[in-house]
Amino acid sequence: MLEEVSMLKFLSSLRVILIAAIAVMSVLATIYPEADAFNSWSFRILVIAFFLNLSLCTIKLLPGLWKQMHRTAADVPETGNYQVYAADEAAVLAWLQENHYKISRQEQGVQTKILAHKGRAGLAAPHLLHISLLIILIGALISTFNTQGYLMGQVGQIRPFPEELQKAYGSNSTVEILDFQTAYDEKQEVDNWITRFNLYVDGQLVAPNVETKVNTPYRYGKLMIYQNSYDYRYLLEVDGLENEEDNTTYGLPDNQPSQIAGQTVVAATVNGKPYVQISDHENPPRGQYVEPGDVLALNDSGATITYLDTTVYTVLELKIRQGTYVVFAGFLLATLASFLFFSGRYRELRILTGTNQAESKIWCYSKSTMVIEELQEALSEQWTQQQEVQ
């Protein structure tokens, strides 16, 4: 017995070390995402070690749970922390039934043993929680083998799957980008970015005109397509400069100042519309909303800027998520375990009657001191306590 206790203490301390190591690696992976620590073998080894440790602890505790779940009146001990109450067996049984206890009764000569309990499902809650954690760890381990890649393209383009995913879906798998939009809320603030596309798997159209948003990926089986990022290029044609080489078409990045013939030109999307602003060190900035074909004066020498169009690049992340449903199943089981925790703590009454027809010995048992005190208070309110027998 002492060896088992010592072993459990050792395993418990080892579990704390493993949790701390996983937490530290998770923090480092968040700070340095380029290290891709979650897909490293060092992280996998930690998860496997934690899984084995938790599994061993769970297995060691299961026999005790089985024994407690199958106790009957025959297991009521002759001695223990019993309190004597002025109540006969009939009164005790009536009170137990009124309070919805499950009752096991056994007669032994002149003495009767009674085992009454409530909240037995709560006994399994810690073990179900352990099992749910094991399932989540399995899902997390599977997820470290996820395959992912990135795809960048403009509206109207058909882009092939990243090489990392072509082995799983075929070299003829593509994404046809139909549209990219910036969504605004009622206050004209950015609400989301949305890409609409056709999905082809090995040349076959499997998902027409679907969309992905930030935090709302599109799912096709194990494949998930995320809105990773985006980029704008505003096409501006410059004309009228003395240097003919400067009279060309520029692709300005979104909301980034660019120098053109001594002028600072900024193009951005404001309230869903393209806006071009021109400024220098002498005059106040001037700008306006533009549509294709609109012309703006670049400087006082007659040079002009013509807005042609806005080219949008969307960046999609394609990922095969192997362990998603396993993790989801683990969370469902953890939710069930949490419900059992709060649905009622296990309480047990061990009762001896018969040696004195007007008295009953009752031992209140629970893993919670508060529950034991509640039981003792309820019994004292119901019957007079005669004496305490150790």
Image (spheres, grey):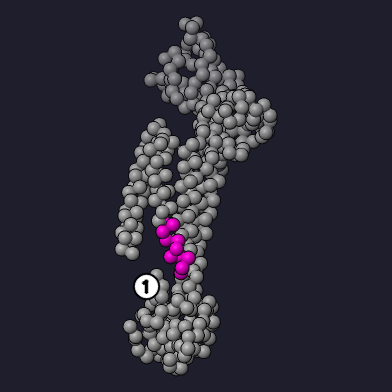
Specify the principal SS of the magenta part: helix
Q: Is residue 95 above or below residue 60?
A: below
- Say left or right for 386 vs 103: left
- Say left or right for 134 vs 386: right
Residue at image position (50%, 82%) is 106
Q: Is residue 3 above or below residue 355?
A: above
Instruction: Out of 225 and 196, give the one closest to the viewer.
Output: 225
Residue 10, picture quadrant: bottom left
- Boundaries of the magenta span: 58-68
Residue 67 among magenta residues = yes
Could you say where residue 370 lies in the image, as x and y percent from the top left?
A: 38, 73
Could you say where residue 326 lies in the image, as x and y percent from the top left?
A: 53, 47
Residue 383 among magenta residues = no
What amino acid is labelled 1 in the image? Answer: Thr
**Which residue was labeled with disc 1?**
369
Assess disc 1: are there few (<14), some (14-19) or many (≥20) residues with their C-alpha within 10 Å of its C-alpha.
Answer: few
Quarter holding the N terminus is bottom left
Residue at image position (53%, 28%) is 164
Residue at image position (48%, 46%) is 138
